[in-house]
Image: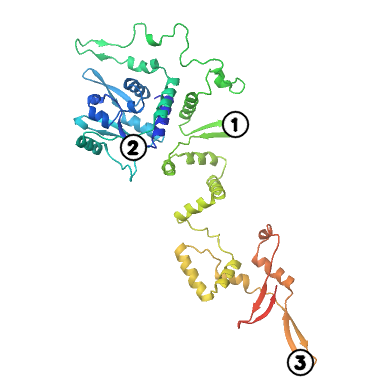
Amino acid sequence: MSPGLLAVLAEFFDVIGSQKAHWYRVLDTENGHGKDLLIQSTFPSLSSLMKMESNFVHELFVEVGLVKTRLYRGVHIAYADRSAWDSFFHEYCLEMETTVFEPRNSKNTYVRIGRWSNVSHPPRTPGQIWKEAIKKGSYNLPKLRISSAAMKLARCIGKQFTTSTLSIASSKTTSKNDDNGSETSNDTSDGSIASNDTSDGSTTSHDITKMDLPNLKEYPLFHSHGLNINDESIRNLAVHELLKNMGGNAILYRQKSHHKGALIRIPSANSAIGYSKLLKRKGNFMEQLLLFMNESAKGNEAAACLIQYLLDNYEEEFREVASKNNLMVRDDKKMEPSKVEAMLHEAGIGKSNSRVLFRHLNQFFGTSMFASEKVRRKCFSGEEFEPEVCVHELPDKTKINYWYKLPHVMMQHYTPNLFSREDFLDISGVDITVGGDHGKGKKRFQFL
């Protein structure tokens, strides 16, 4: 196969792949269907879709291996190679498919291009379309906007190959003469093609002038080989050949700093659903990225790095995906004891009711997201700050016992249990309210 031509074809099919779907014949004259007007109007050929002559498209498909020929009763018959088409779809991630259909009792290969819509353009098989065409005598084809895409296709093919290039393969094919059984050949006697003779020194489509050559200092390789780096088809061909040499998924190389580098092939898709399908395939581009990163990372550090990046830059989307997949909160990610107590106090939930609440939450989420009662007791019980107890004697000799706690000493005592040193790194100020309640709705003291 010719990767340069295949890339050009893939780009054309990808552009029109977002429009309304329909089934097209691979070859215009396969099994005599070119003479059936109803089949022609119902299932146009790919040559009509590409706005090219059928013979030219036939030679093009033979050149890239999508169409092959076989000898049948002394005659070379062209046929579409479905396995080659399927490989082509897979390699370039095209949402297309092939099928075999037999209108007029003749088996032919059809290609589906475009998208179906369950509402406005529901999926249909060639058989269903053909039944409607026979019943009505015609079929309304979907209207496509492909003029610019077809022009670009013709321009890109013309840059890479001349007509003679495509004709070489077909010119070597011989056919039997039905009258006398002798073989005839399309080759000219001197092995050249008269219509493309360049013996007079004129330039061909491959020749480029010095003005087209890239700068020798910046692009020495392309310059030395006489390649025009501004030609998109040449760039595509160079990349495809490098990818093919290295397995087809990534190009590994040494950067100028002598560190390893990688160029990973990321196919294009028309929607997020398309990318989801690509990521489900074995050996997808994310797997290639992780394989490269794991060469310098340990274990699953590369995956953790990418996940952290997505969380930092796309937090809302990250949380939405996590919620849809019912991901649990990490065991070590719990609400702190002080925050749990503050929540329960503000909600007016006592010890018994809080136990019922936490039990239901644990059963629903499958894990505890709050500091346990044992941990909360450890923080707020058994480590009380002992008050200073004093006696005040009135003039009438009445003694009043009282106690007090110095606020700054009390805060020094409780702070290490409530906060860590890291919690204070970004704090510029603190507002504190302290109070006590003996249980009967009266305050013993309040300090603000």
Q: Nearer the viewer, mark 2 or mark 1?
A: 2
**Where does the image place residue 347, in percent across and percent down from the top left?**
55, 72
Q: Is residue 365 visible?
A: yes
User: Which labelled disc corresponds to residue 398?
Assistant: 3
The picture quadrant where one finds residue 175 is top left
The picture quadrant where one finds residue 149 is top left
Q: Nearer the viewer, mark 1 or mark 3?
A: 3
**Where does the image place residue 235, in percent across and percent down from the top left?**
50, 26
Residue at 52%, 63% (x, y): give it. 369
Going from the N terminus, do you reach mark 1 or mark 3 first? 1
Going from the N terminus, do you reach mark 2 or mark 1 first? 2
Residue type, label 1? Gln
**According to the image, label 1 marks what residue?**
255
Mark 2 crowd level (few <14, some 14–19, many ≥20, 10 Å Cα): many
In the image, 349: left or right of 197? right
Residue type, label 2? Ala
**According to the image, label 2 marks what residue?**
21
3D distance between C-alphas at marks 1 and 3: 91 Å
Quadrant location, the C terminus: bottom right
As helix, strand or loop, the secondary structure at mark 2 comes to: loop
Q: Is residue 37 above or below residue 365?
A: above
**Where does the image place residue 240, in percent across and percent down from the top left?**
46, 28
Q: Is residue 115 above or below residue 246?
A: below
The picture quadrant where one finds residue 88 is top left
Is residue 129 or residue 438 the one in the foreground?
129
Q: Are the residues flagged by discs 2 and 3 in contact, CB closer than 8 Å?
A: no
